[in-house]
Image (tube, grey):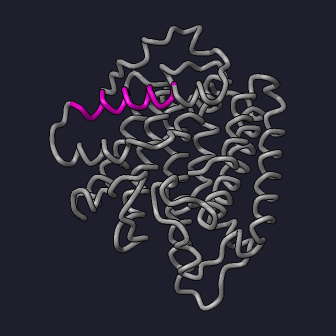
């Protein structure tokens, strides 16, 4: 049972208070650290240690999107914490596998040795597998939302994380390295809507699902998530060119070294930045129905194209 002890520190009314982005993100990180501890600390072995390690050190942006979209729909963190940790588990699993020698073969992630470097390849593979299954376990807790909502969350996350989403996008991305002709701009968008965007869209819309909100609310958050996810990846392409490896906590310039087509290679550095900025404007406008309650998510969108890592 996912018996989180982190939530009672925040009373129900405070849970629904609009915060600025930095405060809300810090709060999310604190909640994720505590929730991770509650779930994994009882298991004292290398597998749990590797899982916990993979969940550490990130921004927890996807969890933030879950918690903030829930707050905007009058759902507190008590109900949204399990889905928030679930999306972080899926994201962490994807990074572990992405870093493996058979994939991107990276030695650093978030400024620390990748899981297969700190432990070994078989521990990394199994930690990723375990994080993936943990995500769905978290979404199906007996004390969670009603069964219809649980099924909606599980089904949509399975799609977002699998063949039609993240994994499918990752497969297209890997295939790009051996193609005779580089991907077109539209094909790159297709890759990134899956590889990066699908999980971000799920996180952004999960609050509406938890609240059983109307179609207009879900569509607004879905549009926001789609624009945010694409802007996020475009900015990753920008940082791969002009980012600092120390600030990024990982190698830069790898896409160019491999000759992969990116938003920057198609649009140029200035064009890619302009496109990302336009997507952020679209994301912010999508939240009009939430009026000032959408301000924190609007700040998050602007953060995505100002970050240095």
Where in the figure is residue 111, as x and y percent of width and height? Answer: 41, 52
Most common secondary structure along the magenta stretch: helix
Most foreground residue, 18 or 209: 18
Q: Residue at x 79, y 64 (%)?
A: 270
Q: Residue at x 69, y 33 (%)?
A: 297
Where in the figure is residue 120, as x and y percent of width and height? Answer: 22, 62
302 lies left or right of 92: right
Where in the figure is residue 231, as x and y percent of width and height? Answer: 70, 54
Q: Residue at x 43, y 51 (%)?
A: 110
Most foreground residue, 60 or 91: 60
**In the displayed structure, would residue 155 be above or below residue 29?**
below
The answer to whether residue 211 is magenta is no
- Quadrant into which the N terminus falls: top left
**In the displayed structure, would residue 26 be above or below residue 131?**
above
Most foreground residue, 246 or 92: 246
**In the displayed structure, would residue 128 be above or below residue 102?**
above
Where in the figure is residue 71, as x and y percent of width and height? Answer: 62, 22
Most foreground residue, 251 or 119: 251
12 lies left or right of 108: right
Per the rendered image, the range of residues in magenta is 27-41
Q: Residue at x 74, y 71 (%)?
A: 186
Which residue is situated farthest in the left direction here?
45
In the picture, residue 233 is in which quadrant?
A: bottom right
């Amino acid at each position: 049972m996912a018996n989180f002890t982190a939530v009672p520190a925040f009373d129900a009314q405070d849970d629904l208070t609009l915060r600025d982005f930095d405060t809300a993100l810090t709060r999310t990180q604190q909640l994720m650290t505590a929730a991770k501890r509650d779930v994994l600390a009882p298991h004292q072995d290398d597998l749990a240690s590797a899982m916990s390690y993979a969940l550490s050190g990130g921004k927890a942006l996807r969890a933030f999107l879950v918690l903030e979209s829930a707050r905007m729909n009058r759902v507190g963190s008590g109900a949204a914490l399990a889905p928030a940790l679930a999306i972080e588990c899926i994201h962490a699993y994807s990074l572990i596998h992405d870093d493996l020698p058979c994939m991107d073969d990276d030695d650093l992630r978030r400024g620390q040795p990748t899981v297969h470097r700190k432990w070994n390849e078989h521990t990394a593979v199994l930690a990723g597998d375990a994080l993936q299954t943990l995500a769905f376990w978290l979404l199906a807790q007996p004390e969670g939302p009603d069964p219809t909502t649980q099924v909606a969350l599980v089904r949509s996350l399975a799609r977002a994380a699998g063949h039609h989403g993240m994994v499918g996008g990752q497969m297209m991305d890997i295939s790009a390295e051996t193609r005779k002709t580089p991907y077109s701009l539209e094909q790159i968008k297709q890759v990134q809507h899956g590889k990066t965007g699908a999980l971000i869209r799920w996180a952004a819309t999960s609050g509406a699902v938890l609240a059983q909100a109307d179609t207009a609310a879900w569509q607004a958050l879905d549009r926001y998530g789609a624009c945010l996810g694409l802007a996020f990846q475009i900015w990753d392409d920008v940082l791969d060119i002009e980012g600092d490896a120390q600030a990024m906590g990982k190698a830069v310039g790898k896409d160019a070294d491999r000759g992969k087509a990116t938003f920057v290679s198609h649009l140029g550095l200035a064009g890619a930045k302009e496109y990302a900025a336009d997507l952020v404007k679209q994301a912010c406008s999508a939240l009009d129905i939430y009026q000032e309650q959408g301000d924190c998510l609007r700040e998050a969108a602007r953060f995505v194209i100002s970050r240095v890592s």
